[in-house]
Image (spheres, grey):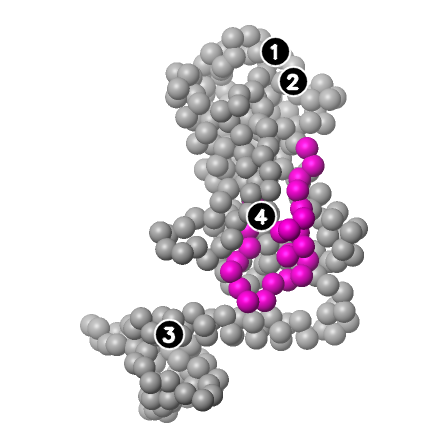
Amino acid sequence: MHWLNYHHLNYFYTIASEGGITPATKKLKLAQSTLSSQLKQFEEAIGYQLFERKNRKLHLTDIGKKVYDYAHEIFSLGEELRESLGNFEDSLRVSVRLGIMDSVPKKLSRQLFQIVSNQHKARASITEESLSALCDRLEKHEIDLILANDKPPTDGKKSKFHAKLIGELKVVFVGTPDMVELKKEMPRSFNGQPMIMPGEHSPLRNEVLDYFKIKNIFPEIVAEVDDVELQKMLVLDGHGFSVLPLPTVEEELKTGELILLGSTPICHENLWLISAHRLIHNPIAKLLLNTFRPKS
């Protein structure tokens, strides 16, 4: 094969993405016979069968899956190029699309933005979601870099993502001043007390639950919250004590709005910068990956 027919590649990619020739004809506005003929020409040109029929449905062959992965990368990059040229004036200013896990302290999000804006004079768009949602966006080239307090999930195969450990956060148990009695004999004093627990998307949650299990502690969980700022607000409102990364509550501890009930080295949070394995990297995202380290 001396050259690649990108029209044929697009037809193949659409068939695979839409789940068959019939739905692909509607998207491409081509006759079914025409599309089938184009697919056959493409398979003959590259010398491999890309689909096999099982139970009246088309399924990608092993070679077909490999070609599909390359096609996805090619057309995703093409879409990035189209968008970057859509507004020439905007394209003159470098931009970066950041995804930040909703359980990361806002103080660290501000640090990341300040570096992008002040040091690199770049424009940032910021998305806050769960890690799984952010990884999905990263894979689709909708964002360039993720700041997270958890590593990306893997399916046992080679990971699609690169996760770089950039720091560790101390976590503390905090409450309002009227909870000062809970400092005595901590953590046994937490038994039966109302607690705002990190949500299911927070990696800290399992560490805290394991810690309580070891110590035979059973607080009354009144809320489970992913967003650390909302977690803090509920504590400030007097709904219960909680466990939070220290940067999230430093100001409130200084002003006395919250008090330190205790801490444990068993519970901590790691910070990660996550990028996707791709051929072309956003230059600002690459700089952040190599240089950004959170300030304590």
Distance from disc 3 to disc 2, alpha carbons, whole Å, reads: 57 Å
Q: Which residue is mark 4?
A: 273
* Viewer-closest of 46 and 135: 46
User: Which label lies toward us, 3 or 4?
Assistant: 4
In percent of width and height, residue 274 lies at 55, 51
Q: Which residue is mark 1?
A: 180
Dot 1, how many residues are within 10 Å of its Cα: few (below 14), some (14-19), or many (20+)? some
Question: Which quadrant holds the N terminus?
Answer: bottom left
* Marks 2 and 1, the one that precedes in the sequence: 1
Q: Amino acid at mark 1?
A: Val
Q: Tell me: 180 left or right of 251.
A: left
* Marks 1 and 4, the one that precedes in the sequence: 1
Q: Which residue is mark 2?
A: 259
- Image mark for residue 16: 3
Q: Amino acid at mark 2?
A: Ile
Dot 2, how many residues are within 10 Å of its Cα: few (below 14), some (14-19), or many (20+)? many
